[in-house]
């Protein structure tokens, strides 16, 4: 099993250093300590789950570019980008560029999105639920075509590209992760188009994998071709300490998950991150 570090808040106290300094230190420790991935949330305002909307929030792809220059081995991605915020041709170009400049370490995380308030607040497009899922399917098709050698036109209901020229290409091509556990639409799209899926690692996690398997059967896709990832807090000082965290990760492993992504509470103090590197990552790497 692989572990990935997720960053979803940047409300770090000034005495910890500048935001850039702390972010760089976190990235280096994660990179050198054995994390397989480093992901950032793709919001423009902070969400109510992690604070108030006026709390600091960094634009995702600018942040990933900064992280690419600070690290050498971790894969870099958003978890995940709302499909409506950027045209898919531009998203594919951005992720390809990240891949080229990072030595092939970019992944594309996409989802239907949900935060209408921040979108309307900054004048970003935000359609109805049905249309967003239609756009997500077309965006996945566009990105797959742009990650190939094809320069053909793409004409869909929502997006039209006269050419999918994308030079230079990132080698290997960025893997595509679809985020969300919606059983009727999200997991269907993951089964049809994605290299990886991401669901919440709670009590329903095993059920979500069963639904994904069923969707793969309908799509005539090999279930084993899709990496199964879950997101849970990576808290080494929470219930049960590191032993409790390892037990929770082992449950997900036994359910069939290949990797886990998670935020670390109190990460700006660095100490919990160092504990994960010293006591959790070596054990998980042996599984």
Image (tube, rainbow, N blue to C red):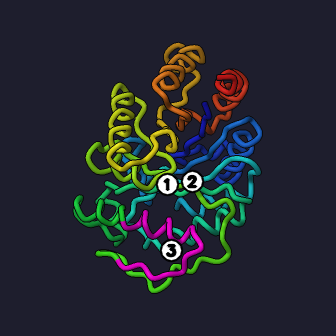
Q: Which of the 4 quarters of the picture holds residue 64? A: bottom right
> Which residue lies at the image location 53% right of the left edge and 71% below the top edge?
146
Quadrant holding the C terminus? top right
Name the residue nearer the viewer: 232 or 43. 232
- Secondary structure beneath label 3: helix
Residue 20 pos. (x, y %)? 67, 54
Side of 170 relative to 82 (left or right): right
- Secondary structure beneath label 2: strand
The answer to the question of whether label 2 and label 3 lie on touching residues, with beta carbons closer than 8 A, is no
Name the residue nearer the viewer: 177 or 48. 177
Disc with the residue nearer the chain's start (2 vs 3)? 2
Region rendered in magenta: 138-155
Residue placed under numbered mark 3 in the picture: 90
Side of 133 relative to 241 (left or right): left
Looking at the image, residue 160 lies above or below residue 49: below
User: Mark 2: few, some, or many residues within 10 Å (few <14, many ≥20)?
Assistant: many
Disc with the residue nearer the chain's start (1 vs 2)? 2
Distance from label 1 to label 3 (Cα)?
Answer: 14 Å
The answer to the question of whether label 1 and label 2 lie on touching residues, with beta carbons closer than 8 A, is yes
Residue 231 pos. (x, y %)? 47, 36
Residue placed under numbered mark 2 in the picture: 77
Q: Which of the 4 quarters of the picture holds residue 181? A: top left
Please give the label number shown on residue 109. Answer: 1
Looking at the image, residue 82 lies above or below residue 35: below
> Which residue lies at the image location 67% right of the left edge and 52% below the top edge?
18
Residue 155 pos. (x, y %)? 36, 79
User: Mark 1: few, some, or many residues within 10 Å (few <14, many ≥20)?
Assistant: many
Side of 258 relative to 72 (left or right): left
Quadrant holding the N terminus? top right
Looking at the image, residue 152 lies above or below residue 100: below
């Amino acid at each position: 099993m692989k572990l990935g570090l997720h960053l979803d808040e940047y409300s770090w106290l000034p005495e910890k250093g500048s935001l850039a300094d702390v972010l760089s230190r976190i990235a280096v420790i994660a990179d050198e300590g054995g994390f397989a991935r480093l992901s950032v949330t793709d919001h423009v305002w902070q969400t109510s789950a992690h604070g108030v909307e006026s709390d600091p929030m960094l634009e995702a792809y600018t942040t990933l570019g900064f992280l690419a220059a600070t690290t050498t081995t971790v894969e870099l991605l958003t978890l995940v980008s709302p499909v409506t915020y950027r045209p898919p041709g531009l998203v594919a170009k951005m992720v390809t560029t990240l891949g080229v400049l990072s030595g092939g370490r970019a992944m594309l995380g996409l989802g239907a999105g949900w935060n209408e308030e921040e979108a309307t607040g900054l004048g970003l497009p935000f359609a109805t639920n049905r249309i967003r899922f239609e756009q997500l399917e077309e965006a996945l098709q566009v990105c797959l075509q742009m990650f190939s050698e094809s320069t053909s036109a793409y004409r869909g209901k929502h997006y039209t590209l006269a050419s999918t020229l994308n030079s230079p290409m990132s080698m290997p091509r960025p893997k595509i992760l679809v985020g969300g556990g919606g059983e009727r639409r999200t997991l269907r799209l993951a089964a049809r188009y994605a290299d990886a899926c991401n669901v919440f690692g709670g009590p329903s996690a095993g059920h979500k994998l069963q639904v994904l398997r069923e969707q793969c059967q309908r799509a005539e896709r090999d279930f084993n071709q899709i990496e199964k990832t879950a997101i849970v807090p990576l808290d080494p000082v929470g219930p049960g300490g590191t032993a409790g965290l390892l037990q929770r990760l082992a449950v997900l492993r036994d359910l069939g998950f290949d990797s886990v992504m998670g935020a670390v509470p109190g990460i700006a103090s660095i100490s919990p991150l160092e504990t994960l590197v010293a006591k959790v990552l070596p054990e998980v790497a042996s599984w």
